[in-house]
Amino acid sequence: MNPMAFVSFVKRIFNLLTRVRVEREIQAEIEAHIELRVEDNIRAGMSPQEARGDARRRFGNSALIQERTFLEDSSLIFERLGSDIRYAFRQLAASPRFTMVAVASLAFGISGASTLYSVIQAVLIDPFPYRSADRIVHLHLYDQRATPRDLLLTGPQFLKFETFPDLEGAIAEDRFSEALTGEDLPEQVQVGKLSLNAFQFFGVPALIGREFGPSDSQQVAVLSYRFWKKHYQGRSQIIGSSIQLDHQDYTIIGVAPRRFTWNDQDIYIPLPYSADARRIAGVYARIGPGMTHPMMERKLQPLLDGFAQETPDNFPPKFKVHLVSLNEIAIGEFKNVLVILFIAVSALLLLACVNVAILLLARGEARQPEIAMRKALGASRLRIVGQLFAEGLALSLAGGLLGIFAAVAGIHLVSRYLPRGTFPTEAEIALNLPVLMFSAAISVLSGIGAALWPALRASRSPFRQEAGDIFRVVGQMHVRPDYMVFLAAQVAVTLVLLTASAAALRNLWQVLHADLGYDPQNLISVGLTLHDGAYPRWPDRVNYYERVRREIESQPGVVSVAIAEGPLPPVMLDSAPFSIVGEKSDSNEQVLPLGVSPQYFAAMGIRLLRGRVWSDSETVHAGHVALISEATRRRYWPHSDAIGQTFVLNHGIMTGNVWTLVAPGNAGQYQVIGVVADSPNQGLNEPVMPAVYLPYSMVAFDWFNLVIRIQADSTTLLHAIRQKVYGIDSAQAVGDATTAFDVLEEASLGRERFVAWLFTAFAFLALAFSTFGLYSILSYLVVRRKREFGVRLALGAQRRHIVRLVLSGTSLAITAGIGIGIIADFGCSFLFAQWAHGNTRDPLILSAAILLLTFISLLAAFAPARTAVSIDPIQAIRSE
């Protein structure tokens, strides 16, 4: 939009609004005066009609005059403002480099801050669409193990729990992988089984159709938005049709809205709760307003202790209940990363404002003679201030407008590369308008303030003082203290961001080159889940698993296939109590157990260091053998031979239930027959925890993963696997394939890459701001002292002396900024190391950042210094 057209539009709106307000105020005032005049006229002998008519004629004309005068004054103000803005745009166009740098600084500051603030708003502050989501909690049970257990209740227990005082309701839920049958090949889908009150609890209406409620039967289904789009292409005609899960028909009654992604399930069906103690489900609750987590935990502890006495197999022997909010479950440590990035982008916005302030102050300093001349020619102080205000406003509006467009692009870029699995899928990452307006307002106010500062100072100074600068030949015109403060602040913040960026990049390098202990190349994992009640006898289940493994291994392009009960490393597993037979051990000793087939180590590429791997015969006959990791050997047998030793592992599931089948004679005792190399099992940034590998058949779950090493990437392999499984048992389904690199990306690489990328972008922007700030100060200093430098050169001054003069004023600010930055870096290093991984206080990183900052500062000073030493003395004197 043309600037003058915009001013004209604002003027018309202003006139329209003020006309209404003025008319109301003046009319109220005139009515009061009319009543007084009427009383005077009646006392003077006029009739009431004559008295009122005379009063209205007199004061009606006065009201029109006042209104007209007000509107004429406002019109004059806008005409003057329009003139000032036109002149401001001409002035900015006459200095394209200054304008580009200032506008770009504001745009980058506004866009960066608005983008990341919007992400924080979406991920941390308001990620969930559920009613009173900040009070919805999950319940964990902590015992001596490092990882907690989820609270699992039977049907009667849940009914008691749901009506507990100080709770605003609760839901029960269970998650299954079931087969989508009735079509071509069965497809494994994620099914959330929710208590009938769940959708009332969430308070989120269906997108189309309706949700199920307490009056519904057990054979209804609500589709997730993602599954509806993927499987039914978003057709609304599906309401009332049937969908088949594990060969059971369900009537589709609704589709959940896009943001309803509770536990990332595909389909939601009612939970068939029963009084069977082996049929348990997880619970979520909403605590009452005003209740804190510790208060609620103390109230719930006696109730759960009573439940533990009823069903001791579902609870640890001794435990403490702990409430966890939804956001804490979904985000975890990524919350700390976002807080660090919030601090960094706030510093970046501050740098952008400081950079614009430096540019405008330096430009205002160079324009002091011009302002003095305008005062001499009769310009009032208000007129001068108004003109520079218009320039600051025009510059800020241009930067703000560009920043808005950049923020729109930035939010799409960040949401695309934001690591999946580290934020709630319910979160809607979009540009937040209040956040954008706040960032723009801060930048605009800083630009206007920086523009008014030199104007107010110059308008207070007498003409003779300012004009003396025009004719001064040699003087002590060093950099002003306010410039030095701004420059030192820029340097300090830039140093902190540079060290943070270097630490993040080095941590990313270490993660990328970490010793995984296995080969992730051409390695995939495919999940298989039995439908409820399938293969209820232990021998039949193990034989089925072995048959599937052998059939898949016979596929062309498959190198080896193994069975594993857990995901690929480095995803953390649940720990279990561990003790050595015949030795007194600490009751808090924990290891990570993983049930696998003997082919697991060859398929993964994990090296066997000592001993042997158990055989297929030992798998199907429930051999009580185990392999331990090198970390386990170092921890428990550092000076003795671990081979042949016996240990006890308390899985906590030795009695079994409807989903797990325990091998005959399994008492939890295993003999060590080999030692294998370590693999990361708690992420890529944490030390490896002791691990033991057991035959998966010792506890045969109703789900397992196929770990498959292939010769090359194959898009048809998953379809072939589904065909093989369908040929063995048509009732079973196969899940999607996940590569080892996908697991690594979600576990650590995605987050570390995202943090390193953002910190590097922030650091380079900060470096650019500092560079342009220093360059601007020195450039205007050289222009201001051009005649002085010319006289010095004419009198025989050496060029190095001129360079020293150019740098003398800013070198102190740079040195002070580096010193403050080092102190700030030491203060922030602990926070950064704890929340974002990496050490900003490392001497090598700190030294490299200081050297880079010093080099860039010298580079920024090179052009102004070269201009100063190349001044022609004769031309410099004549130009004045």
Image: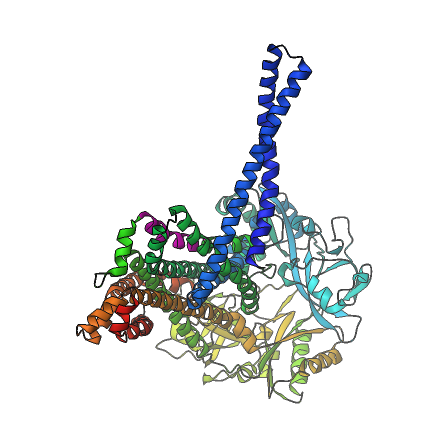
Which quadrant holds the C terminus? bottom left
In the image: residue 635, left or right of residue 325: left
Give x and y (percent) for residue 155: 67, 51
Residue 413 visible (yes or no): yes
Q: Quadrant of residue 596?
A: bottom right
Comparing 161 with 73, the one in front is 73
In the image: residue 381, left or right of residue 107: left
Q: Residue at 51% x, 71% y: name it.
A: 750
Above or below 590: residue 599: below
Span colored in magenta: 445-460
Q: Residue at 58% x, 14% y: name it.
A: 40
Above or below 46: residue 220: below
* Picture colour scheme: rainbow
In the image: residue 272, left or right of residue 392: right
Comparing 45 with 422, the one in front is 45
Give x and y (percent) for residue 835: 42, 62
Give x and y (percent) for residue 664: 61, 71
Give x and y (percent) for residue 870: 28, 76
Q: How many marks?
A: 0
Furthest toward the left, the residue is 796
Comparing 398 with 548, the one in front is 398
Residue 278 visible (yes or no): no
Q: Main secondary structure of the magenta part?
A: helix
Which quadrant holds the N terminus? bottom right
Comparing 234 with 870, the one in front is 870
Does 813 lie within the magenta span? no
Q: Residue at 62% x, 73% y: name it.
A: 704
Q: Quadrant of residue 552?
A: bottom right
